[in-house]
Amino acid sequence: MASSLLYSITIRSLLLLLLHLSSLSIYLAAKHNQHGYHRHRSHSHSPTSNQRLHQAYIALQAWRRVIYSDPNNFTTNWVGPDVCSYKGIYCAASIDDPKVSVVAGIDLNFADIAGFLPIELGLLTDLALVHLNSNRFCGIIPQTLTNLSLLYELDLSNNRFVGPFPSVVLSLPMLNYLDLRYNEFEGPLPPQLFQKKIDAIFVNNNRFTSAVPAFLGGTSASVVVIANNNLEGCLPPSIANSADSLEELLLINTSLTGCLPPEVGYLYKLKVLDVSYNKIVGPIPYSLSGLAHLEQLNLAHNLMTGIVPQGVCILPNLANFTFSYNFFCEEEGICMNLTSKGIKYDDRRNCLPEKPFQRSQKECNDTLEHPVDCFEQCCEGSAGGGAFGRATPFAPALVPVATPLLPPSLAPSFP
């Protein structure tokens, strides 16, 4: 499943960078003509006469001075003013003057560099792409990055960054891809993150806390991954507001409680839904039967009960359906034999009669004696305490024993 979630970080990103710069150039040219003015800059490609390359030289030299470990000698050739020849640094024509070269991209993925980000990086105002996946950068994200008004992709994943959510990213008007996975960020996720026009949000495997944000339903992203944080609360019914964009939603191991809202069934573009390793109660909403594009559904390791509905099992594109480690007591129709449809499934550790590897009768009785009525109970979504007006009467079935998502250094990417 990880391969369906991750964007390419090499050739694909560089192509996106060039396309992005090209579209920005056309846009700005039209804007300048409309207002009757033009910018005049030196057309020389020489780093000594190109002010923006000189600014880049200052920034990159400041960065090199705070790199404490470079075991692969990635930055060995970061010497001299010709920054376009530096390894991992990509130049392109400026969007406002195609005769002027600028530093438009930085790709230090998998370089294993240790250090931090200096404030001088704010001088790289022409950057459209920054990829720092799988290094040992630490500290906080400098506020000077607000100057990167053209930044389109920001990948800081698999490092050692700390502090609260880096609010600087909220001020980047062109940002379309944000990847903060596998760091040590903490505190709440800001509502503005889900109000930005952004296509992909990866914030999994950090230390984010507080209630699941009700404003999650306002996102225009196609991919949202908030797994392996401690958010708590219910998945808000407002998630239906993202129906026109959301294709992949992963909330693995985020301490979700309450019932899965039927509004999830309104996400008609959804291909991947994974809410495993939580404390979700109640039945599978029958509205999920309308998710015609759904390919992967994972409800495992929750406290869900009731019937596994046939409407879900006959979804035309369903390829993987995992509902193990719950308390389901019946599989409807074809759900009893998903192998015949070529669907990979896991129904272990439920309360399904005549199926192998199920829970004991005592386990099943202890939970099924306390049914949950999702229509009568109101989800308050508060952190701490129960998800409903009163606490749920049972404890989690299991504590997660493994991280369900691969770290960026190991996860496959699109071909």
Image (cartoon, grey):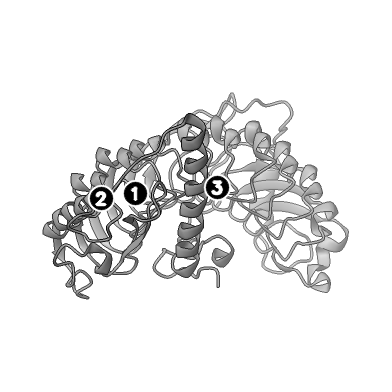
State if disc 1 and disc 2 touch (CB < 8 Å). yes
Q: Mark 1 packing: few (<14 Cα in 10 Å), some, or many (20+)?
A: many
Q: CA distance from mark 2 to mark 1?
A: 8 Å
Question: What residue did someone put label 3 on?
Answer: 199
Q: Quadrant of the C terminus?
A: bottom right
Question: What residue did someone put label 1 on?
Answer: 126
State left or right for residue 290 relative to residue 134: right
Residue 73 at x, y = what percent? Answer: 19, 74
Label whose residue precedes the other's in the sequence (2 or 3):
2
Tag on residue 2? Answer: none
**In the rendered image, is residue 140 in sight?**
no
Q: Toward the viewer: 14 or 341? A: 14
- Under mark 1, the amino acid is Asp
Q: Secondary structure at mark 1?
A: loop
Residue 237 at x, y = what percent? Answer: 66, 32
Q: CA distance from mark 1 to mark 3?
A: 21 Å
Question: What residue did someone put label 2 on?
Answer: 52
> Residue furthest toward the right?
333
**In the rendered image, is residue 249 in sight?**
yes
Decide: is 225 above or below 143: below
Label whose residue precedes the other's in the sequence (1 or 3):
1
Q: Secondary structure at mark 2?
A: helix
Q: Toward the viewer: 180 or 171? A: 171
Q: Residue at x 75, y 59 (%)?
A: 352
Q: Which mark lies nearer to you, 1 or 3?
A: 1
- Under mark 3, the amino acid is Asp
